[in-house]
Structure formats: C-alpha cells, structure tokens
Image (spheres, coloured by chain):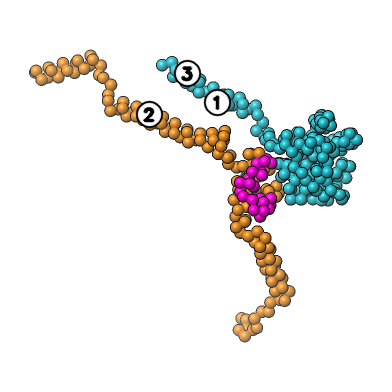
Chain colours: A orange, B cyan
Amino acid sequence: MPRRDAPPPRLDGSLVWLVVGLAMAIGSGVADVRAATGPAIEDRVREIASELRCVVCQNLSVADSPSDMAKEMRNLVRDQVQEGKSAEEIQAYFVSRYGEFVLLSPPKRGFNLLVWGLPFLAIAAGGGAVFLVARRWTKRASSPPPADPTYADRVSRELKNREGG
Amino acid sequence: MNWKRLLIPLASVPVILLLAYGFRVDPKAIPSPLVQKAAPDFRLKAFGGGEVSLADLTGKPVVLNFWASWCYPACYEEAPLLEATWRRYKDQGLMVVGVDIQDKEANALEFIRRFGFTFPNAPDPGSKVSIDYGVYGVPETFFIDRQGRIAYKHVGALTPALLDAQAQALLKGT
C-alpha cells in the first residue's frame, strides 16, 4: 500500500518543456493561419472553391479534393479573394482558363437553360399525361357502355312479363 | 388512327440523332478556351539560373511544354523528341520552353540530366503558370506563334510527326 504522505510525483523537466513547446507550436500554427487569412476569408474561399471542378479528379470540387492541383487552386482562389476580387470575377478567371467545364453547375443561360428547364418541363408533361389518363379511366368507370340491344330487349321483355304475370 | 402508329418511330428519331452525335465525340476532349487567344505571359526562375519569360520571346515561335518527373511514361516518351526538335530548329528561331509542375527539385534535375535538355526549363511554384494555361495534367504542350497567340494545344505525349508538323507550321507563320 502506498504511503499517504508521499510527495506528489515531480514532472520531469524536459517533459514539461516538450509539452509546452508542442502546445506553443500547435497554437502558433493555428494562430498563423488565422492571422494571415481570417475565418471569413476562409469561408469565402471554401464557398468559391466548392463551385469549381477539381480538374484532375472525377466529380470532386476544388474545395473537397485532397489533390495537389486542387490545393494550388484553393491557394489561387485565396490570393484573389485577398486581392478583393468578387466570386464572379474569380469564376470568370477559371472559366477563361479551363472553359465552362470547370464550373460544377452550368451557368443558367443559352443552351444550358435546357439542362435546367428540361426536368421541370418533363415533370409538367408527365403530370399532364397522368391527369389526362386518370380522367379517362374515371369517366369510363362512372358511365357504363350502352348495353347490347338484344339483352336490353330481353330484360325489358322479361320485366314486362313479370309485371303482367 | 394512323398518327398514333407513327408516334413511337417519330419520337425515337431525335433520340437516335442525339446518340449518333454523342457517340462520335470524345467525352474526354475538352476544348481549351485559350486556343487562338493570346498566350498568358509568365516569368519563371529557370533551373540552373536565369529567367524564362514569354515576353522576352516576342517574335519567336515557342513550343511550351508542361512536364513532371513523376509523369511516367508519357513525359519520358516525348522528352527526347522535344530536345531533338529544339536542336533541329533553334537556328531557325524556334524556342522550346519546359515548365516542370508539382515536382521535387532533385527529381526534376535528374530528369533534365537524363534527357540532356539544353533548352530552358523552369519549375512552377504554386502551379500558377499551369493554372493560367488551364493545364489539367502532364504532359500538355502549347504551340505559340510569333504574335504570341496559342495556335495549337496538345494533351498527352507528343508524337514525332505531330511535333514536327506543328513546329514547322509555327516557323512558316509570319
């Protein structure tokens, strides 16, 4: 059983310095990034980068890709944001270099409108078709087709006989 | 009714036309918006000292090649062709410039030594020049005419015939 009045274990000096040093290194690293860019700028960089296609990946945005090329592109976006360029100007720069392919969502104009409009047009057309077909079916159900005259005659004849007899 | 029978064949005509068009184009071929436009200027520190700048080369046709030592085998296939073209046409005024992207300096220098490059080559810190040229990957080669306009862009390894034809076309241009 350990003695109660034993002195608390002393921290080894070098260990303390190591921990303090590490904390300072991590802290200063974080502080560096924040001081140089600021969270607001980082948010804007992310926002713009998430609309740009990482050109060396398959369907990943520049914001999400871990590739070197995407990293360099993020840095370039950050540089341009810090120069005070707007999101449109930065997008226009990348489009002028890589073409519209670099945008993850095609701009809503010209031929591209087809991409944006067609799904809604298809939904409207499909809805119309369903409506027309459904109306035809319900009509058929509510008004039965005219009876075969031979059977109708027979029914009326037999009814008459029944009433007469 | 007759028109109802025609409905399906008629509706399939545009679909067949669309597919006929779609299967003929290469989905991986993305036209560069830079072709026939002014080549973006750059100024880079060359390997082994000195600077390479497009502005300094005005009036000269330029073959601008983007490469990397990790780009195997395509860059290794075309590297001897670039050096040979440079040696064949430099007296006629053709310039060959290599830009090494996302590479380690030691590996890049080894690549240059291996192929005995004598034309200027420069690393591209931050890939700024590569992005300015809309480079997707390596190798890519831009053929820039005497007016500083991009006449042609080639993606992938160059073939001897293509490189020679493009170099001659650049030299012929006034």
Question: Do callouts 2 and 3 point to residues on the same chain?
Answer: no
Residue sitting at 75 percent across and 36 percent down?
B150
Residue B87, position as x, y percentages in the image: 89, 36
Indicate the chain on which mark 3 is placed: B
Question: Which residue appears farthest toward the left when viewing the image?
Answer: A165
Observer able to see residue A120: yes
Identity of the residue drawn at 19% across and 16% down = A154
Q: Secondary structure at mark 2?
A: helix
The percent position of residue B14, horizontal first and vertical second, equals 54, 24
Q: Residue at x 65, y 83 (%)?
A: A7
In which quarter of the view is residue A4 placed? bottom right
In the image, what residue occupies the spot 73% across and 34% down?
B36
Q: Which residue is mark 3?
A: B6
Depth order, front residue of A132/A17? A132
Please name the predominant secondary structure of the magenta segment in the image. helix
Give the alpha-carbon distance from disc 3 to disc 1, as whole Å.
Answer: 15 Å
Residue B11 pos. (x, y %): 50, 23
Q: Which residue lies under the disc numbered 1? A: B15
State yes or no: residue B108 in magenta: no
* Label 2 crowd (10 A; few <14 / some 14-19 / many >=20): few
Q: Amino acid at mark 1?
A: Val
- Camera-nearest residue between B6 and B132: B132
Say what secondary structure mark 3 lies in: helix
Q: Chain of mark 1?
A: B
| Residue B170, x across and y down, in percent | 81, 32
According to the picture, the residue beneath numbered tag 2 turns out to be A132
Which amino acid does the dot numbered 3 rest on? Leu
